[in-house]
Amino acid sequence: MDTVIQKKLAKRLRELRKEVGMTQEQLAELSGVDYKHVQLLEGKKPPAAKLDTLEKLAKAFKIKLSKLLDF
């Protein structure tokens, strides 16, 4: 995944999480994604995210994957 896309995803995750009033810990618990990984995905140098991780995050937000990636 391109670093520009990774940074856009990081921003999108933060925005969505804050919109619904969710902490990183809550997102991790609801999605089944490790808390530290959620932190990394929202960080300044986010790693590439796997498709299954993105699907889990979208499910936690109760949105379609396409909506999660709408940035």
Image (cartoon, rainbow, N blue to C red):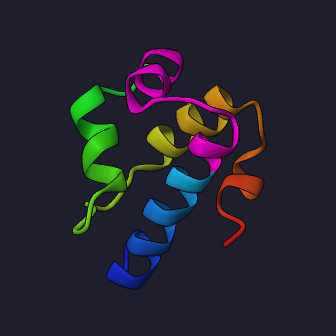
In the rendered image, residue 37, in percent from the top left (x then y), is placed at: 26, 39
Seen in the image, is 14 located left or right of residue 35?
right
Look at the picture and state if 36 lies above or below 29: below
Look at the picture and state if 31 lies above or below 41: above
Look at the picture and state if 29 lies above or below 66: above
Q: Residue at x 76, y 55 (%)?
A: 67
Q: Which residue is drawn at 32% across and 80% down?
A: 3
Look at the picture and state if 32 lies above or below 7: above
User: Looking at the image, which is closer to me, 24 or 59?
Assistant: 24
In the rendered image, residue 10, in percent from the top left (x then y), is placed at: 43, 61
User: Looking at the image, which is closer to me, 25 or 62?
Assistant: 25
Seen in the image, is 18 located left or right of residue 40?
right
Magenta part of the chain: 16-31
- Residue 47, quarter of the rendered image: bottom left
Seen in the image, is 3 located left or right of residue 52?
left
Look at the image and tell me in which quarter the C terminus lies: bottom right
Q: Residue at x 34, y 52 (%)?
A: 41
Q: Does the magenta stretch include residue 46?
A: no
In the rendered image, residue 57, in percent from the top left (x then y), is placed at: 55, 36
Look at the image and tell me in which quarter the N terminus lies: bottom left
Seen in the image, is 54 located left or right of residue 29?
right
Q: Residue at x 59, y 43 (%)?
A: 18
In the rendered image, residue 58, in percent from the top left (x then y), is placed at: 64, 39
Q: Does the magenta stretch include residue 20?
A: yes
Majority secondary structure in the magenta region? helix
Q: How many labels does the image show?
A: 0
User: Looking at the image, which is closer to me, 49 or 14?
Assistant: 14
